[in-house]
Image: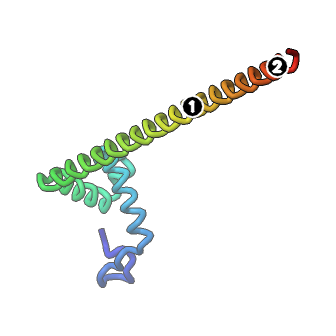
């Protein structure tokens, strides 16, 4: 392009932070689509160049290795999360099971105590009748 409104001639002004963020966003969207540019994007020479540069970087053997390592780390992380979640579920399950067993035992003790008291009461009544 031309100088880009830099007051006629002279070096072009560096783009603002907002411009850079918007451009990054645009390049990221292109990358997400597998570097397929829409017609409106093809008119933006800077975007076309940036996307092409990023695509080259991504497809470089070194970058591919880094990318695969990243993906592998992410998968390993997810696997770790899944395993941890499963262990937590198992622990909760065991705790609930123990709680149920304890409650059952307490209820059985209570029932046995009540029966013993009833028998004692019957024995006392029988003795008082005799």
Q: Is residue 130 above or below residue 89?
A: above
Q: Residue furthest left?
A: 61
Q: Secondary structure at mark 2?
A: helix
x%, y% of residue 17?
41, 73
Q: Secondary structure at mark 1?
A: helix
What's the residue at 38%, 56% (across, down)?
26
Q: Nearer the viewer, residue 48 or 129?
A: 129
x%, y% of residue 109?
63, 29
The N terminus: image quadrant: bottom left
Is 98 on the left or on the right of 1, as rendered?
A: right
What's the residue at 41%, 75% (across, down)?
16
What residue did someone put label 2 on? 127
Mark toward the start of the polypeptide (2 vs 1) = 1
Q: Nearer the viewer, residue 54 or 61?
A: 61
What residue did someone put label 1 on? 100
Q: CA–CA distance between discs 2 and 1?
A: 40 Å
């Amino acid at each position: 392009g031309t100088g880009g409104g830099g007051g006629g001639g002279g070096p072009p002004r560096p783009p603002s932070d907002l411009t850079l963020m918007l451009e990054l966003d645009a390049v990221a969207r292109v990358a997400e689509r597998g570097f397929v540019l829409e017609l409106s994007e093809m008119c933006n020479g800077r975007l076309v160049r940036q996307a092409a540069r990023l695509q080259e970087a991504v497809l470089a053997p070194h970058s591919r290795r880094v990318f695969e390592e990243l993906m592998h780390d992410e998968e390993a992380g997810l696997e770790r999360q899944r395993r941890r979640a499963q262990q937590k579920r198992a622990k909760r399950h065991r705790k609930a099971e123990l709680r149920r067993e304890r409650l059952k035992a307490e209820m059985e003790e209570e029932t046995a105590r009540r029966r013993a008291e009833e028998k004692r009461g019957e024995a006392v009544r029988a003795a008082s009748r005799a």
